[in-house]
Amino acid sequence: MENKSFDMKIFTPSQIVKELDKYIIGQTEAKRAVAIALRNRWRRQQVKDVLREEIMPNNIILIGPTGVGKTEIARRLAKLSQAPFVKVEASKFTEVGYVGRDVESMVRDLVEVSVNLVKAEKGNEVKAKAEELADERVLDILIPPVKKTQPAPMAKENEEQPENGEESEAYQNKKTRQWMKLKLKNGEMDDKMIEFDSQAQSSIGMQVLGPFGMDDMGINIQEIMGNIMPKKRKKRKTTVKEARHILAQEEAQKLIDMDIVQKEAIERVENSGIIFIDEIDKVAGSSKGQGPDVSREGVQRDLLPIVEGSSVNTKYGVVRTDHVLFIASGAFHVSKPSDLIPELQGRFPIRVELNSLSEDDFVQILTTPQNALLKQYNALLETEGVALNFSKDGIREIARIATEVNEQVENIGARRLHTILTTLLDEILFDVPDKIPANTVKIDAKFVKGKLEKIVKDRDLSKFIL
Ligand SMILES: Nc1ncnc2c1ncn2[C@@H]1O[C@H](COP(=O)(O)OP(=O)(O)OP(=O)(O)O)[C@@H](O)[C@H]1O
Ligand SMILES: [Mg+2]
């Protein structure tokens, strides 16, 4: 396929599942489904033109109780494929007026994400160059270059000392600059104050509110005004360290070609964008909303063209949504996927159920993912020289309590682990470093029981705390 202006790693389905396994415990079926869908999109793009249009995208509905990894799977999928990703709540579109937004806005948001993504990547590419230029500007302020009468001193790197043996002013200047540059790079000048011109975009001093709906048409008043207003130079005084940072960003802005960024961003949305529609079950069923709200079926009808593939105007250009991958998710306690309008059902052919999490899953979730909760707390306290040593039976006890509270109060899945850990570690987090010096704190089953048992036994209390 010809669109290869950006370098993206194309994972095979089994590689995708392996990557997801690093963060999400269990839910194998859901991982497989998203892996296949992602790969199928790529496969579809390889197919010859005529047939390609016939192949429908593999949009997915993830069905499962709260807190079992639905959003997390989609988020990680986007991250590993470096795809632009947005998450929207379907129920949001049932509200009209100020808070309610039209359905196309999800595509505009996706483009915005993509632009930032590409911009950040380009920024990284020019980072070294921009820092170099910024340092030159700082040097110009610290040691103003010599006047025009001299030949440009910076032109040649290995310029010989002038014949007459006398060091010319230019030569001197150049030597000082080189010496100063080294000091800059070593951070020796960091705390010195410096005054410089920054090209702050002249802000108009108040929020410009366009007429209603301007945002929805993909027109950005602020930007139009910004282009009319001249770029103002503003005197600023900061430390050298900060000045280098600010100027490097300014230089990077100048080095990045925004036209290319926009073009690439749109390409990337069209070829690899992922839109995650949460709470799709809330718009299932045909019941009319109360009062001024848009009916649920209305939202589904609005969603349809976008999911089927249509052109959406954005301020960066027109975007086709044909290849955007849609992943919908919902608990479907009350309604069922079959309550969605048939056309929409047809556009989400893949249904996957996620399982509730067991005590064993919780043990895993606490310890194995790369971002596992216990690793997070350990990293936090390590900064104070305190090591948390969770014993095996301690971890088991946390998992057991999480399961128990989920059963007795309300099943909120893995989110329960967050609330339990904050309660469990509350005192330690408060007492470090004043009362608990750098040391190892052992957290075993006894400790966990001591902290939590009373709260767990008291249902009213656990409703509020755990
Ligand atoms: N299977 C799992 N493995 C590892 N972590 C998980 C798992 N399930 C949930 N989590 C963690 O629990 C939290 C909530 O998960 P997530 O946001 O995916 O829930 P959800 O299924 O989307 O729920 P909801 O229906 O409420 O949106 C996240 O911090 C996530 O990392
Ligand atoms: Mg979610």
Image: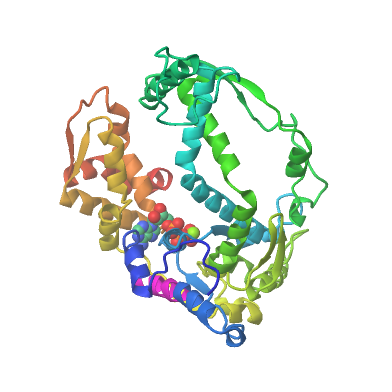
Q: Is residue 463 shown above or below 293?
A: above
Residue 66 as seen in the image, left or right of residue 103: left
State the image coordinates of residue 430 (x, y, percent, origin top left): 32, 29
Which residue is farthest top? Answer: 166
Which residues are the magenta region?
Answer: 28-37
Q: Is residue 296 shown above or below 243?
A: below
Q: Is residue 334 visible?
A: yes
Residue 288 as seen in the image, left or right of residue 62: right
Which residue is farthest right? Answer: 211
Q: Is residue 309 magenta?
A: no
Name the foreground residue: 176 vs 277: 176
Who's the residue at 42% across and 69% down the image? 10
State the image coordinates of residue 354 (x, y, percent, origin top left): 41, 70
State the image coordinates of residue 406 (x, y, percent, origin top left): 37, 57
Who's the residue at 74% across and 35% down the image? 207
Q: Is residue 409 visible?
A: no
State the image coordinates of residue 79 (x, y, percent, origin top left): 44, 58
* Image quadrant in which you'd find residue 356: bottom left
* Image quadrant in which you'd find residue 438: top left
Name the foreground residue: 203 vs 306: 203
Residue 458 as seen in the image, left or right of residue 74: left
Chief SS of the magenta region: helix
Q: Is residue 33 magenta?
A: yes
Q: Is residue 302 shown above or below 187?
A: below
Name the foreground residue: 444 vs 41: 41
Name the foreground residue: 422 vs 90: 90
Scheme by which the image is coloured: rainbow
